[in-house]
Image: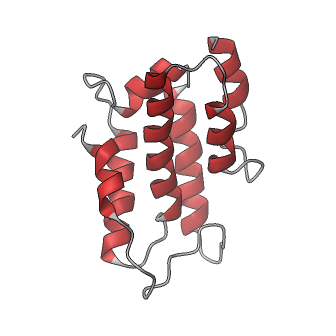
Amino acid sequence: MHQDDIHERASGVFAPDTLLPGQYFDRLRRGKDLMGEQRLMIAVLESAVEDYLKYVAAGDRLRQGLFAEAERWIESTDRSRLYAFETICDHLGLNVEYVRRGLRDRRERARAPGHGTAAPMPEDAAPPDAAPARRWAGNE
């Protein structure tokens, strides 16, 4: 897959409510020329972004912890590990600061009073399995 193809697909990833992250990652994964390592990187990035967006306004400690873990990984400037956020973005041809800025904007909108985009998970909902989140966060 050419870098231009990834950039073309990445444009608008974090545009306001035009494309859900899951839809974007599905489109990115469908690339015929992706190697196994690239597919794994997409899955790692997708998992972190999903946790970030899903738990941004969480009201319980477990989900707040999952958000914090995703946020730490995304905000880390460590490039020494293969599956660090910045390394993955580099390999996939994504602009690190553009992705971060989009996620930060979503965080601020979700936490704004009266905003319903990222509703907190109900307190009585079944707790998420924390093990998948640890797979991508093992870079710490």
- Residue at x 61%, y 61% (from the top left corner): 109
Image-based side of 2 in relation to 94, left or right = right
Model colouring? secondary structure
Q: Quadrant of residue 68?
A: bottom left
Residue 115 x, y percent position in the rendering = 65, 72
Q: Residue furthest top?
A: 2
Q: Residue furthest bottom?
A: 124
- Which quadrant would the N terminus be assigned to in this image? top right
Residue situated in front as seen by the camera: 79 or 42: 42
Residue 6 x, y percent position in the rendering = 65, 22
Residue 46 x, y percent position in the rendering = 51, 44
Image-based side of 92 in relation to 81, left or right = right
Residue situated in front as seen by the camera: 13 or 76: 13
Image-based side of 138 in relation to 73, left or right = left
Q: Residue furthest left?
A: 140
Residue 56 x, y percent position in the rendering = 48, 63
- Residue at x 38%, y 51% (from the top left corner): 70
Residue situated in front as seen by the camera: 34 or 107: 34
- Which quadrant would the C terminus be assigned to in this image? top left
Q: Residue furthest right?
A: 18
For residue 82, above or below residue 16? above
For residue 29, above or below residue 65? above
Query: Number of callouts in the render?
Result: 0
For residue 103, above or below residue 63? above
Image-based side of 60 in relation to 107, left or right = left
For residue 76, above or below residue 113? above
Q: Quadrant of residue 117?
A: bottom right
- Residue at x 49%, y 70% (from the top left corner): 57
